[in-house]
Image (spheres, rainbow, N blue to C red):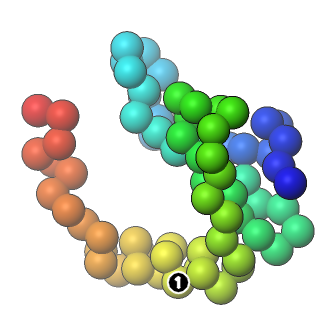
Amino acid sequence: MFDDQDFKKSSASPITWDTPFCVEVAMKDGVVGVRDSKSKGGAVLVFNDKEWQAFITGVKKGEFDIGLDTLGS
């Protein structure tokens, strides 16, 4: 469904860490794929456009703020 070149990583993703913590997102034919950047050949979570829009709306509203300032410290 998705090719490696379809996936995009956030410009905010660290590229110098020993263990990068990032996901990559691909959009193609009305579906969105999300994968772990450390496991490019692994599983891809797939969402339709309505599911993805609901998630992004929740993110923008802060519904998923989980105290990220305390992670990794």
Instruction: Report which quarter residue 34 is drawn in.
Output: bottom right
Write the residue at 21% across / 51% down.
68
Kindly give the residue lying farthest to the front in the view shown. Answer: 43
Q: In the rendered image, is residue 25 in sight?
A: no
- Image position, residue 26 (x, y; %): 72, 53
The picture places residue 61, in percent across and down from the top left corner, at 35, 80
Q: Is residue 34 left or right of residue 30?
A: left
Quick one: SS at disc 1?
helix
Q: Which residue is mark 1?
A: 54
Q: Amino acid at mark 1?
A: Ala
Residue 22: where, in percent of width, then height? 47, 39
Q: Quadrant of residue 70?
A: top left
Above or below, 71 against 34 in this view is above
Name the quadrant of the C terminus: top left
Q: With respect to residue 28, does 38 lie above or below?
A: above
Question: Who is closer to the viewer here, 52 or 61?
Answer: 52
Image spot of residue 40 (x, y percent): 65, 33
Question: Is residue 63 found left or right of 68 in the rendered image?
Answer: right
- Nearest the eye: 19 or 14: 19
Q: Is residue 55 above or below residue 40?
A: below
- Name the residue rendered at 18%, 34% in the picture: 72
Q: Residues within 10 Å of mark 1 (few under 14, many from 20)?
A: few
**Left or right, residue 40 beside residue 37:** right
Residue drawn at x 53%, y 83% as measured from the top left: 54
Number of marks: 1
Q: Residue visible at 48% across and 22% down?
A: 15
Q: Quadrant of the N terminus?
A: bottom right
- Does residue 33 show up? yes
